[in-house]
Amino acid sequence: MTTKKNVTIYGCGMSGLVAAINLAREGYEVTVHDREKTYGGDPMYNPSAHTTPILPKKVSDYIGIDITPCFQPLQHLPSYFHETKVEGCPPISGEYTVERGNRPTSLDSYLIPIARDLGVKFEFNSPLRKKDIPGLEPGTIIACGLTPEVYDMFDIPYYRWYGWISRGEIGFSARSWLWWDEGNTEYGYLSSINNYYFNLLFSIKPVSKEQLEKYKDFMKRREGVEHKEWHYGGGAVPTIAPDNPRLIRKGLIFCGTMSGFMEPFGWFGINGALMSGKLAAMAVSDPAKAQAEFADLSRYFYNAWWVKNKIWYPYLRGHIGLFEKVINLIGPERFSRFLAKYINEQRHVPFAIPGYANLGARY
Ligand SMILES: Cc1cc2nc3c(=O)[nH]c(=O)nc-3n(C[C@H](O)[C@H](O)[C@H](O)COP(=O)(O)OP(=O)(O)OC[C@H]3O[C@@H](n4cnc5c(N)ncnc54)[C@H](O)[C@@H]3O)c2cc1C
């Protein structure tokens, strides 16, 4: 009788679960550990609603799990440059919303029973700690998301982000927006799905209460939305270095956002997390093939990293007013039509979302 090989995964988020399901199907005995007391991730962020460019059917085919029921196409996604509204700013084609966390309607709640039915075991309240690292078996999968302590444990460089968060039930779905202003280095956005919203105003520098008040005022006037409660949070994002994307480090397999398989301009992480779950599972049996596939699917990362870090932050980010002037000179509607014609229809997503462009072309 042959004994099944064991694989240990740390992190019961979306990428850890995709890896677990794929490995269990291949006959591995899989145990998933998570530091929280149940699935659904960090309670600082989740439950949450995310907006993301993705091709749900193609990603489903790639990862071998039909995740299409969890994604809803967006009905409303304006970008505001201060007060100037542009419909359909990139990346627009294929914008969806998806829910994370442990509510019954989330992606996580969808994946957990699939994993359980395949015999995947779960150990909650079981964090990976620095002192555990020397004892980890080669091939252990690390899928701990955006948790700064874990990046520190493995010396993975990251941006620290800070932000004001609001979330809860709301009377609409599949509606999002983006708001650009000089007072924070990233943007403010709302995502909504299943009558649940997530709103984040974030930056790689601390975000003041005054900036939050400015955002709240904008939301009320332009989108007619107010939230009662906001809290301050933060985390890590591995988009600071051009060589952040790495599947294998010192014999351990990195999975999800921890592997750097994230779009480095807008920090879209959903597409990459799902696909890297499949790649991490592949790396257990065929690391060379998985690394080649990982490199191929993240090959535009460097270009987008360069634009964001060498052009956008130093020269453009501080001049939202200039963008506003140019858009108003062209005319916001004409500008929207230009985007629709040359970016949406032709699917020229000008970002390096790992796997996204390639999925359109290759799979
Ligand atoms: C606030 C916020 C908003 C975002 N918004 C968007 C968006 O709108 N669109 C988009 O495309 N992307 C967005 N992202 C990025 C996207 O959510 C992530 O890239 C993606 O969810 C990461 O998936 P993952 O599988 O790598 O990690 P996760 O799904 O986050 O799972 C990580 C798991 O690891 C566990 N864990 C952490 N530390 C330990 C430890 N020491 N030991 C054991 N377990 C541990 C956590 O509890 C969690 O369950 C956002 C991220 C954040 C934080």
Image (cartoon, rainbow, N blue to C red):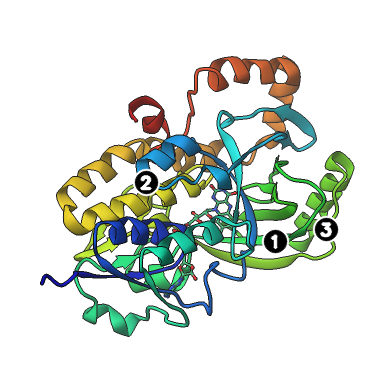
| Of 88 and 156, the residue lying toward us | 88
N-term-proximal mark, 1 vs 2: 2
Nearest to N terminus: mark 3 or mark 2: 2
Amino acid type, callout 1: Trp
Q: Is residue 278 above or below residue 359?
A: below
- Residue position for label 3: 227
Q: Position of residue 276 (x, y in %)?
A: 36, 51
**Cα distance in 3D space between marks 3 and 1:** 12 Å
Mark 1 beta carbon near ligand 1 (under 8 Å)? no
Task: Say what secondary structure mark 2 lies in.
Answer: helix
Residue, x 30% and y 50% (percent of image)? 279
Residue 225: x and y in percent read: 85, 48
State whether residue 246 appears in this view.
no
Judge left or right: residue 137 versus residue 265: left
At label 2, the amino acid type is: Ile
Pick whichever of labels 3 and 1 is earlier in the sequence. 1
Q: Which secondary structure lies at badge 1?
A: strand
Q: Is residue 144 visible?
A: yes
Mark 3: few/some/many CA within 10 Å (<14, 14-19, 20+): some
Front position among marks 3 and 2: 2
Question: From the image, which quarter does the C terminus lie in?
Answer: top left
From the top left corner, tell me how far across and down residue 23 is, in percent: 29, 59
Name the residue beneath numbered marker 2. Answer: 63
In the image, which is nearer the foreground, mark 3 or mark 1? 3
Residue extending furthest toward the bottom? 131
